[in-house]
Image (cartoon, rainbow, N blue to C red):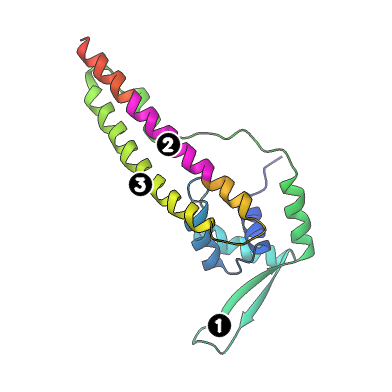
Amino acid sequence: MAKESRTKFVILGLLANGVDSGYAIKKFIEKSVSHFWSESYGQIYPMLKKLTAEGMISEVVDTGKSKRDKKRFVIESSGQKALSQWLETKTDMPTIRDEMLLKLFLCNSDKIGCGELLLKEQVSQFTESLDELLIIESQLLKVEHSSKVFWLASVRFGISSCRQRIEWAQDTMKDLKKAQLQK
């Protein structure tokens, strides 16, 4: 049996937390969970339409405040039920598809410089992500919300993952230097 789209549950979960438009959903994802999850507008808007057709959410149109009507969405009881059921199901082991690791694996002893470049990029990228997550964490610490503890948990997972990835890359660069000296 094919797996149900996780986009459905992202949208239901964010609507349940008061994020109420396609644009707001995309921006919320970018500012909160992008270290482990992403959704595009091309995934969000068709799913909003589908969930509306299924009666899991309803559309509310705000008129008069601007030139364009603003569409907001509200989760319905059937959407709440589907979200609750999904939250209680067992999660799958994450699948890792990491282009940098693939490239590193395919390097050989003649390409140590290539491996070092890949690892330096990783340190730079994950240091930047770490800095962003630390800012998000400090902002979350000031928020009063019933989901705050869960939001902090996911952000702190990202912080821990970034730190681990940076440490791993630095250790691996040392190993590459040792290997180069032994040639």
Would residue 47 be found to the left or right of residue 103 on screen?
Answer: right
Are the residues at dot 2 and dot 3 in contact (C-beta closer than 8 Å)? no
Are the residues at dot 2 and dot 1 in contact (C-beta closer than 8 Å)? no
Give residue 90's position: percent from left, percent from top. 72, 38
Q: Secondary structure at mark 3?
A: helix
115 in relation to 36, above or below = above
| Count of marks overlaid on the render | 3
Within 10 angstroms of label 2, few (less than 14), some, or many (20 or more) residues?
Answer: some
Position of the N terminus, as image quadrant, is: top right
The residue where tag 1 is placed is 69
The residue where tag 2 is placed is 163
Q: Secondary structure at mark 2?
A: helix
- Nearer to us in this view, 151 or 27: 151
Q: Amino acid at mark 2?
A: Arg
Magenta span? 156-171
Q: Which mark is residue 159?
A: none
